[in-house]
Amino acid sequence: MHYIQNNTDENLIFNISLARMTFLSCKEKNILSKKLDSSYSLALLSIEEIFKIIDSPAVPGMQRRAFRGKWNGAENLNAAQRAAFICKKRGYRVLSYEDAEYPELLRNIAEPPFLLYCHGNVSVLGERSVSVVGTRRISPRGRKSAHDFAYEACLNGCGVVSGLAYGADGYAHRGAVDAFYEHHSDKELTALGKTIAVLPGGIDEIVPQGNKFLAEKILKSGGCIVSEYEPGVPSENWRFVARNRIIAGLSPAVVVIEAPTGSGALITADFALESGRDVFFHNAAVSEEALMISAAVKKNLDLRFARKEVSKYKIENTVTKYLEAGAAVIADYADYCRALAEVPGQRTSPVLQGELF
């Protein structure tokens, strides 16, 4: 079945066809997009011809044979046509790496998504923001901290980026949404920040399902839901990790609310540092409650590490590691703003001094 109706549709299908080539980097997809003129031209190419066009002769023959098993031009084109049809029917915007509306901060990470599927207000992607992350297993103090930080940020006109997960993510999104609904009619607040949710699966795959109502409120409050995956792509475990680089990439700074040992939030912090972004820890992350949760998690991880079920990186990735490297602890959004203006390493972590919040 063919869904092409005009040149705009063809351009969309071509971009989706390229985005689906998971064995290529964003840079290689950009090369193909400039050297080919249509999705049909791409569909007719063999894997050897593709690597010749992107000038990658160093790929060994055995590896190319493996790639050949991942490439069927006709099937790829058909899937791209289906995805383009769904995007147009449901009103999803699809931003390519070269589009003017593609977020500049995201464009500058090590491996940016070639396409960004968007549902909602795309303009917020280019506005001032802060990424807020944390554990799903969050303490009552952490819940309030995530909510209040996001609430205050949005009142200050700063958007909030997170991952729509249970725990810290969900409370951060709720804080942003609450700021909108409680203050959007106030004349003195002309530019409230909005919230952006980054999904680990297809743009139509809201996970967890329990946050579907929250996702609707994000859209109704002027926010945006984004994904690097086309409609219908399942939320597999490895995609949660890949999603974290986008959360980190959309903002100049990441604030970690709570993160026990091995938390995915700390992977987001790593992505942020690799991209030259600032990383801060809310004092809820070093409270007695949070440290007790982290100790329980670490005990379980140590057992799993002994059974070779988790990596050494996971059990060594702790809040303390970042604090020893100079990450600052902040109390709230106002304190975060002060910390942004300080010299890196100026604050000495109370935890390293044996103090708890």
Image (cartoon, rainbow, N blue to C red):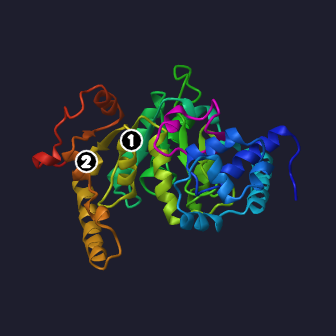
Give the image location of residue 159, x and y in percent. Answer: 50, 34
Residue drawn at x 30%, y 32% as measured from the top left: 335
Q: Position of residue 321 (x, y in %)?
A: 23, 51
Would residue 83 be seen by someone viewing this image from the given angle? Answer: no
Q: Tag 2, which secondary structure?
A: helix
Q: Nearer the viewer, residue 179 or 12?
A: 12
Q: Up-down: is 313 above or below 181?
A: below
What separation in Å lies between label 1 and label 2 (alpha carbons)? Answer: 13 Å
Q: Three-letter amino acid code at disc 1?
A: Val
- On screen, residue 3 versus residue 76, left or right, reads right
Q: Is residue 35 left or right of residue 85?
A: left
Which image quarter is the N terminus in? Answer: bottom right
Q: Quadrant of residue 344?
A: top left
User: Residue 193, position in %: x, y?
Assistant: 52, 32
Magenta stretch, overall SS: loop
Contact, mark 1 vs mark 2 (Cβ under 8 Å): no
Mark 1, residue position = 254
Numbered label attached to residue 54: none
The reply, left or right, for residue 147 in relation to residue 59 is: left
Q: Secondary structure at mark 1?
A: strand
Q: Quadrant of residue 9?
A: top right
- Mark 2, Cα crowd under 10 Å, few <14 / some 14-19 / many 20+, is some
Q: Amino acid at mark 2?
A: Tyr
Q: Is residue 111 magenta?
A: yes
Magenta-tinted stretch: 95-117
Q: Is residue 137 left or right of residue 249?
A: left
Checking the image for residue 322, the label placed there is: 2
**Mark toward the start of the polypeptide (1 vs 2):** 1
Question: Was residue 348 drawn as part of the magenta stretch in this picture?
Answer: no
